[in-house]
Amino acid sequence: PDVPREDAESDWSGDSWSDYGSRDKPGTTLGRTVPDGNVLFPDIFHTDHLLFYERFRAYQDYILADCKASEVKQFIAEYLGKVLEPSGWQAIWRTDVFEVLVGVVGVNCSTLKAVVQLSEPFLCESQDSSFTLESMQELLELKEHQILLQELWVVYDESGEFDQTALAIEHVRFFYRCLWRTWDEEEEDEFDYFVRCVEPRLRLHYDVLEHRVPSGLVADYQNLLSECEELYEKFLNVRNSISSNDSDSEAENVSMVEGLKLYDKVEHLKQKLKLIENPLLRYVFGYQKYGSLQAKGLRPTGAKVTHVVPCTMTASLLQLLARDKLCPESCEDPEIQFHRDPLAAVNACYEGDRVIICPGHYVVDGVFCIADSVELEGYGLPDDVVIEKQGKGDNFFDCTGANVKISSLKLVQHDAVEGILNVHHGKTTLENCVLQCETTGITVRTSAELLMKNSDLYGAKGAGVEIYPGSACTLLHNGIHHCKEGVLVKNFLDEDYDAPKITMVNNMIHNNEGYGVVLVRPSEMKDASAQRTKGIFLFVEEASKSLVSLVYPGNTQPAQAGDETACAEGSRQDQPGCVTDELELYERAETSEQAEGNSEIANALGATSAKKSRIHKKRLSDLGFTEADDNVISQEMFVSVEGNQFKWNGKGSFGTFLF
């Protein structure tokens, strides 16, 4: 903010920053747009199309810099004083009820207002005819002819003289409309306001514009923001009523209690908003989107139907279907319905129905919402029965049924926002399937259960499988590879969450960018968990090698995995001699690595869960439950991790993410 105006203008006029026009070059660098409506207003500058990096650089380098929250208005005023033309330009003054053309005769940067007068000829458009020339002049006199800069849209000028003015007003308008919160001024000033608040909100805004955030999460954020603003306004009213009354009356005490309750609610909502604004954490905590999805239940007739989806139906295919799938062992004559595509078949299902998809490549534009206990199976090998999602959308498969089964299918996802399969409620069994992912892979939400076996999952830009607290996940004989992370386990020390129950047996987790398995846990657990596991295992993370070594009690030096003369089983110090044969060394090291990987995961998840169990028992004890039932206080994570192979994962077999 202290940069001299001439230096600032020289910096902003460079070709490297297209956000600002240069006065050294003739003509404007900005586009123009025709205002909507019936009145023939002059064209205005087109400034609402700016890219993320343009706004980012403007706020970081020229407007806010390293200011604190309490200094925001001061920094903005200084910035405007350097770039705004003080007079001689026209603008359209826009409100919710009218638009009118005005001329700017002065600028008051400290109040973020412009001094205006009505232009000639008088141009005004309103929802009714009550805004005449006389009424508008009276309104301006009441406002002392001062209008907020955010309400002005600068009239287009080809000379380029007013480019910086138009862009500066756009930046201020965008800031107060999309980035500023009414409670920001009361935030602590210990941190850089831009880094702490502006940058994450700006990134979220553009993530939403570019369809990188699920629509449900966007709706949640907007609802939380509206609720927080409403409660904060109530809190301010209560606080002001207390501060203006010095009496120690009962009514004031009641107001203080009410104010404290409102303050706690506001702080809770602010934390939720910050979690969504943080790109690393917005998906960690998730959101409940399909809680209201209702199952159809049984058909009124009580019959169960088999739905058949063929690409083309031939006599031979019909005979094979009749032999293998359509003729049950029971004597009942099944009802069969034929459909053109898999989505129509699933939408026609009731409780207990079965969908058989014949070989073919099916392209669907929609979401499979399975709320009943339905069986969905491909007739043939997974590569022969392909369902590909077409068009942008949040989801591909969403399961809330009590017992959903999906087998022998290949699911292909493109241009998505959410994962390929979300299990929100009930149990979903996935068997002999291939999943080609786009964002995250499979998500197992709280209170849901997934059984995945003999399947192959790859391509997720997030985790291949995300396991939420309070869920149950069984992974048997699967391949999970070429994802950001293999399996992501979310276990939080929160009274609202139970620890997840996890079984992982004989899976091949390989070629993932990060860890094979990663545990998300709160940072406050770090010291306690490390203390509990002292003497049992020690993680030694080497950034250059991304290896994890397991050290047992009694060892004084960790094994050097990279030393060819060291023992392949370095944790056993009493083993006489070392293996020198290169092939035998490799085989032993690989076997040891796989065993250690399974052991590390099981021990770490168990240690984290035990911490939660102790906290839960302490809560019950504080409430007076000294002899609680074991079924009530048992919160430990059920873990069975064995026989899994972890190969060529970028950061190793197991790691943790602290938030």
Image (spheres, helix red, strand yellow):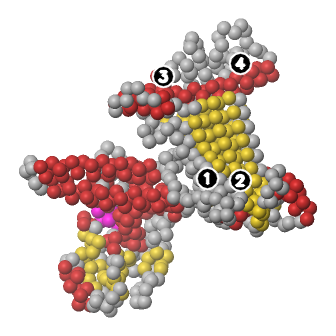
> Residue 653 falls in which quadrant of the image?
top right
Residue in view at x 38 percent, y 31 percent: 620
Q: Name the residue under label 2.
A: 375
**Gap in angstroms between the C-alphas marked 4 and 1:** 49 Å
**Gap in angstroms between the C-alphas marked 2 and 1:** 10 Å
**Residue range highlighted in magenta:** 77-83
Identity, as a three-letter code, of the amino acid under mark 4 = Ala
Identity, as a three-letter code, of the amino acid under mark 1 = Gly
Q: Can residue 505 be seen in this view?
A: yes
> Pointer 1: residues within 10 angstroms few (<14), some, or many (20+)?
many
**Gap in angstroms between the C-alphas marked 1 and 3:** 40 Å
Q: Mark 1 points at which residue?
A: 401
Residue 532, disc:
3
Instruction: Identify which residue, 9 or 43, lies in the foreground.
Output: 43
Q: Where is residue 344 shown, x and y percent of the image?
A: 70, 66
Numbered disc in front, either 2 or 3: 2
**Gap in angstroms between the C-alphas marked 2 and 3:** 45 Å
